[in-house]
Image (cartoon, helix red, strand yellow):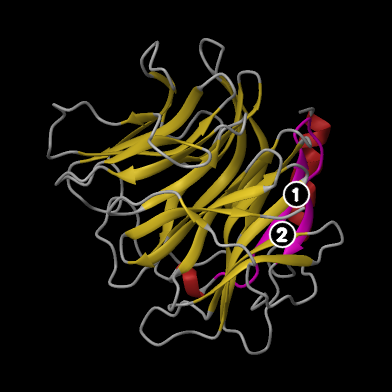
Amino acid sequence: MSAASRAGALLLLAACGHSEPFTTADQRNDGPFSATVPIRLTHAAGSNLHPAWSEDGSAIVYSYLRGTADRDRCLGVLPAGGGTRLAEICAPPLEDEGVLDAYTHGGMDADGRIVLNHHTNSSFVQSPQGGELLLTRLDSVGGRRQITPLLRTPPGTSRPWTYLLTPAWAGPGRVVALAAEAAVGTWWEFDSPPPLPFDTTFRASLLVELLVDETPVRWATLAEVDWATMLAVDRGAGFLYFVVAPPRSPLINTDAARLADTVYRMPLAGGPAVPVYGAPRAASEVVGGIVGLAAGGGRVFVSEQRGVPSSGIRPQGEFASIIEILADGTTRPIDTRRIPDTGRWGRITASPDGRQVVAELHSAPNLADLYLLDTGP
């Protein structure tokens, strides 16, 4: 991206601000419900999280609980239609059982190369103690190569890179990701799950690209995106999308605080970011916001939580919907769930042609499975 293009992206984000978010007509999305039955892809105990469709549409990469006492998380690769895992990326079998190894936030290109986050912790507190961005292959040839260490503040930046969120292949050897310094919410991988099925979000400060085939790996800032929480890439259409949330305290439950999330679109080739959707707030709503983002085939999808709070100390809203954002800023419902009767949708990922999405369905504390949904024509 040229310096002028990058400056345009930064200026536009600054102009939009958080106090006057871009909004569209209020679409409650409490119906109609999906006419098709979602297909369950995972059946393992524990939480199956962070789904990402492979670049060629053949597989789904996701993170799952290994089932060990130290709560290791592995990265699994499923056929796109479900079935037996094609690969499992885990800590070695003889790894210290007192160390939590978390393999999360993976992305796979058309050649079977997988980029992923790896974090370690030996004290089971909220913050990881070690971290790195890795590159490996579906066929395991070549082992695992460190792209960059994490939990450090790279030269020229002011905040640490604890996570590189939702790394996605944006071209040959080019990976884009959100550099996040912290998790915000009630829990995450390194803490015990809460008594209710809640999620967490991350605070990113930069949208970056990494040229992973170069030695050493080079990286560049595409835009400053303070309070960005998620990223999706539609390589076929030539755009990337990201969500910016209102600033909030780490102690505020994210399920009750996302009231003005905004989706931005930015050309992969460089250029300014423009807002395309803002989660509106109806007078009857006190909670709501975007919890998942996906793009493919020139189409954009989000999963949202909306409505008045349920009882308890952690309100979570009444409805969880997956919707498509149309070109005019209006939305089309894909599926709606009533919380807590049928669980709630979480993060989502779209097939390269946009005809299907895979979504987390959270049904209980530390229990989430992946489901496949058709999005229609």
Give coordinates of residue 321: x percent, y percent: 60, 68
Q: Residue at x 12, y 37 (%)?
A: 97
- Can you identify the residue that label 2 sits on? 324
Q: Quadrant of the N terminus?
A: top right
Give coordinates of residue 60: x percent, y percent: 50, 38
Assess whether residue 259 is covered by the magenta stretch.
yes
Give coordinates of residue 143: x percent, y percent: 36, 15
Q: Report crowding for label 1: few under 14, some 14 to 19, many 20 or more residues within 10 A (C-alpha).
A: some
- The part of the chain drawn in magenta is 258-278
Q: Is residue 98 left or right of residue 110?
A: left
Q: Can residue 294 be seen here? A: yes
SS for tag 2?
A: strand
- Can you identify the residue that label 1 sits on? 299
Assess whether residue 95 is covered by the magenta stretch.
no
Indicate which disc, 2 or 1, sits on the residue closer to the N terminus: 1
Residue 44, above or below 115 = below
